[in-house]
Structure formats: C-alpha cells, structure tokens
Image (tube, rainbow, N blue to C red):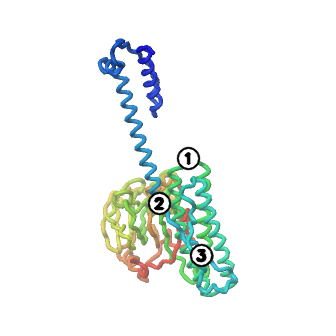
Amino acid sequence: MSRMEGIYRKLFILSFLILEGATQDFGQTQFICTSVPKDMDLCTATLQNSGPGEDLKTTVMQLRETVLQQKETIMNQKETIRELTSKLSRCESQSLPEPGDSRAGGRRKETGSKNTMGDVSRGPSETLAQLGQTLQTLKQRLENLEQFSRNNNSAQTNSLKDLLQNKIDDMEKQVLSRVNTLEESKSGQRNETDQRGRVESTLTSLHQRITDLEKGQKDNRPLDKFQLTFPLRTNYMFAKVKKSLPEMYAFTVCMWIKSNASPGVGTPFSYAVPAQANELVLIEWGNNPMEILINDKVAKLPFLINDGKWHHICVTWTTRDGVWEAFQDGVLRGNGENLAPYHPIKPHGVLVLGQEQDTLGGGFDATQAFVGELANFNMWDKKLSTGEIYNLATCSNKAQVGNVFSWSETSIEIYGGATKWTFEPCRQIN
C-alpha cells in the first residue's frame, strides 16, 4: 500500500468516527480535502495547517465532549430512576372475614406481607394495570364488609369498617403517588392517562361507599362536623361547591385550616367567573406569603399557618375603598385598603376548594394545589365584626354560619381522592 493510500484510509476512518459519534443534528455538512506533503506525517501536517484542518480537529473534540456529557446525563437519569424505585413501599395484605365467619369479633386472619403495588421494574402500562387490579381486590373486600354489615349490626361492624378505612387510606396515598410519577414520565401516552382515570374513579367509588357505610353514624351528627383532607399536591384532587355565589359588595370568608406543606400551603379556595378566573382567590404559592386576590388584584396577608397545627382564619372586605382585614385565631393580624375598590364580586361562577382555577372550573396547576386539611368554610355577604369573628374562632355557641355559603356535607362534591373525616373544631384542634 502506498503512503498516499494510507493517508486516504486515515481520512476515511476519521470521517466514519465523526459520523458515528455525533448525537446531535449539526445541519448540512461538507467534506474538505487538504493536500499533505508525501513524506510528512498526517497528524503533524494537520497541526501545521490552519483553516479546514484546524476546524476538523476542533469539531472532533467538540463531538467527543458532547458524547461524554450525554453519557453522564444518561447515567444520572438511571440513578434517579433507581432511587425512585427503591422508595416505593410494600403494603401488607390482610384478609377480612367472610360474612358468616365466626372469627369476625374484631379479629382478622394473618396472611403475611406481599407487594400489592406491582413490580417496580415493569413498564408503566403494566404497573398501572396492577394498581387497578389491587384496587378491584379492595373493592371486593368492601362488598364483603357491606354484606356483613347488613347481616350483623353490631360493634364488630365498626371495628372492621375502621380497619378497611385505614387500609384504603394507605393504599390511596401510594396509588396516587405512583400515578403522579408515571404521569410525569409518560404524560404523552393516551392509554396510561385512561388507566389513571380508571384508578382515580375507583378511588372515588371506594370513598363514596365508605361514606355510605357510615350513613348510620351521620344520622346522629350535624352535617357540618366534618373536614376535607387533601394528602397530595396534584392537579385533580379538589372539592366543588354545588351552588354559585351571588353578587357581593362585601364579604367575610372564614375557615379552619391545617397544613405543614412547604413551600406554600397552596390554594385553600378559588372562585372563578366566566370573564375572570381570579375573581376571588386565597393562595400561598412557593415562598410568597399568603395572598387574597379580588378581580386579579392582590393583597398580601400576614398569616403564619404552615406549622402542622389547626388555625382559624378570616378575611373581610368591602368594595368601598377596597378595605380589607385579616384575622388569625380570632385576632386581627393585618388590614389595608385599595384592594379592587368599587368592584363587586360577580355572580354565576364556580367555587372550588383545594385548587386554583385558570379557567372556569378547571385549568388546575399541581404546584398551586392545597395540601392539608380544611373545615368549617363559611362565607357571608357582609363584613363581620371583630366580636363575631372571635366567637367563630373560639367555637362559641353564639357563632354564626355563613349566609352565602355554610359548611355542610350536602353542599359540596369531592373529586380525585380528597377525603371526608369527622371533625369538631375546638375539640380536636392541635
């Protein structure tokens, strides 16, 4: 082989390596040939020549660096996936006694532990199918409990009911967490979205049927003795008030709230109307303080509530001069004016608990979702006095209920896995 042929061969191999190592689209390219003295080494000649030869060397080095960087990125992503996989917990599978089982007196058969969440290494579609199968199993066990409840009206029923409720609550948190992870990694696949919807539907059905089982207990308690729990930051877990608000030239809104979410507790409530998504919103987003929005105008509120304890908060406002006041635990913490002055709150909107609306009744953003517990949400079309607000915060028998919206289980609908629990303010706080 002549020396010139050897040079041509080296150039061919170098060109092949460039094409093989490239992982990005650099647009149109061209080959440039440079004459080299017969007796001079190829690498020496390349270093001595400027122009195309130097550009070729630079391109090779850049491509090599790019490939190394992408390999490092891939390794980091694989490590992240392994860490997420290792954090998935295993659920204990405990069987309920059949309706005629003589061991029903608060005892249950020991079955050991098994992974009811499916194999982590499976594909997302297969994993979601496993989640659905797990929930279907819980549903069948709940049917057994319902049958047993009808046949045996005793304290044993309540014991089994509590057992199943705790089991479903634990399962719900793990299922929703897994669904969120899969949704983030495979948000573009329609079949996984459909399966996620079926899982959410099953969760909602389970909680509704638990509510039906507790119907006898509800008959013996006031309809306002309950709380809503939002355990995860999602874009589909919320509660919706069944009726809209009237036009208001003043308002007071009060609630009991508990959260330790960080950063920001999220959006306890939002009210949107057709022409304005931020007609009336209470939100604490990111590292910002809690804010009240009226017609998209903002006032910062001096609330400090993300300590994991129950707090009673109230906000009052009047359209005249846009005067507002903020109360925490019955004490005035701040006030101001010029908040959307002379703008009445518009009617015919949608009132949502737990999510901020970007469109009428929707457009939820998981980063703005409320995480925590909420109870006794009431609203008036007037400004309550300091004494009236203090009565609410101290659970006085003189406390009023909202004349625009009063807290009642029959007035709201829950979606996406939000739950209802028995709650009495001042008896259960902190």
Q: Quadrant of residue 334?
A: bottom left
Closer to the camera: disc 1 or disc 3?
3
C-alpha span from label 1 to label 3: 39 Å
Q: Is residue 48 above or below residue 244?
A: above
Q: Is residue 243 visible?
A: no
Of the pair 271 and 88, the residue shown nearer to us: 88
* Percent of width and height locating residue 26: 44, 28
Percent from the top left, x then y, of residue 67? 41, 36
Quarter of the image containing the C terminus? bottom left
Task: Identify the element where label 3 is drawn.
Answer: loop
Farthest residue in the front direction? 1
Circle 2 is placed at which residue position? 86
Instruction: Inspect this view and state whether residue 78 appears.
Output: yes
Q: Quadrant of residue 304?
A: bottom left
Earlier in the chain: of badge 1 and badge 3, it is 3
In three-dimensional space, the C-alpha distance between marks 2 and 1, rounded to whole angstroms, equals 25 Å
Q: Earlier in the sequence, mark 2 or mark 3?
A: 2
Amino acid type indicated by mark 1: Gly
